[in-house]
Amino acid sequence: MQLEMDKKKNGLNTICTHAGELRDNEFKGAIAPLYMSTSYAFDDVDVKRYPRYFNTPNQEALGKKIAALEHTEAALIFGSGMAAISTTMLAFLKSGDHVVLQQTLYGGTYHLIVEEFNKFGIEYSFTQGWRPEDFEDLVKENTRVIYVETPSNPLLTITDLSRIAGIAKKYGLISMIDNTFASPVNQNPIDFGIDIVIHSATKYMGGHSDICAGVVASTQENIAPIFGLAKNLGGSLSDYTVWLLERSIKTMGIRVKAQNENARRMAEFLASHGDIQKVYYPGLPDHPDHTIAKSQMKGFGGMLSFELNESLDARQFQKALGLIKSSMSLAGVESTVLSPALTSHALLGAEERKRQGISNALIRFSVGIEETEDLIADIEEALKKVKKVHKGQLQ
């Protein structure tokens, strides 16, 4: 039995905790039961359940929770964010079709496009920026999809969702967004007219750096072709991980709001620091897209990026940190940093990174839930160590 909720009347944390919840009617346990079976009856049943069909009890229940969070009719849970992205795009694109994509994208998405789409005969164009006119200028007769990411990884650019949705409707296109950096806590693209919302659920939905998953949410009509391809590609998620993800989402509202506040404080601290050259955070009033961010986000997120002064080495700085971890992923309760040029965007190549404004000095900072005073102290100490090394090299 599942608990049905009115997503229009219930608040965020109530939806996170209870929407789509499986009830333990036999033993009355406080948490959802976990159904580990990979084989279900086929005769005299309303639904023929199979893990690869995304409809086991735990898969189905979590899909309802995520749909409620993203204000959509349905959602599918995948084995990774890239499984969600690739399946969704290929469900709406065939040989001879064209897709317009934002320039500032997650490196894995960019690599998928440039490495794989030519094999399928799918044309693509990357914008030169992230303004709505940059997208409309690239729309062609065979364009079928517009794909955006906002806030973007790793420069935190903001794309105007209402205007992108308007362009898509004007030309009869499907609009898709990677909403990972915002999370449903901070941004609901469906409310601004976007057709399909995608997440790497590994990040804020999982929130504890121990789950790999992806999510797609949309109308039943849009989910149907995605499901049709997904069951053939086989990118479903194990029920145990589905159960862990459902557990994690229960605290997502509380976690993300704490990370929003911490990131704002850290961005303000870094922006005023003499050893920091530039800070990228949409919550800062001097961010070029701050006004747009205010109009479509409920919070500015827990992600920011910054560049040290040219005299300081970014890799040495990260190695000198004690509390803040150097880590490949993001959005866990612990604060982490990485160099996009060496990790998430390494596959782009030096010239493409330069064109996108991703320098070797850029550091992406995923702010956790620690006390900001402790994070500031850690950064100050690391800067002192790096400056000592730099002075020693100069002497």
Image: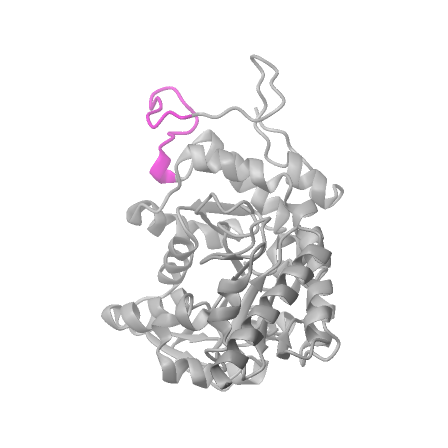
What residue is shown at x 34% (from left), y 71% (from top)?
347
Seen from the viewer's position, the closer of residues 207 and 134 is 207
Does residue 309 sit above or below 21 in this rendering? below
Left or right side of 257 for 117: left
Whether residue 45 is in magenta: the answer is yes
Seen from the viewer's position, the closer of residues 288 and 281 is 281
Q: Which residues are magenta?
A: 36-53
- Please say which color scheme the image uses: one colour
What residue is shown at x 50% (from left), y 82% (from top)?
357
Looking at the image, which residue sits at the far left?
119
Residue 3, given in percent of the width and then of the height, sits at 63, 29
Left or right side of 254 for 123: left
Residue 92, given in percent of the width and then of the height, sits at 39, 62
Tell me the quarter of the picture where residue 353 sits. Answer: bottom left
Residue 285, given in percent of the width and then of the height, sits at 75, 76
Tell me the quarter of the picture where residue 251 sits. Answer: top right
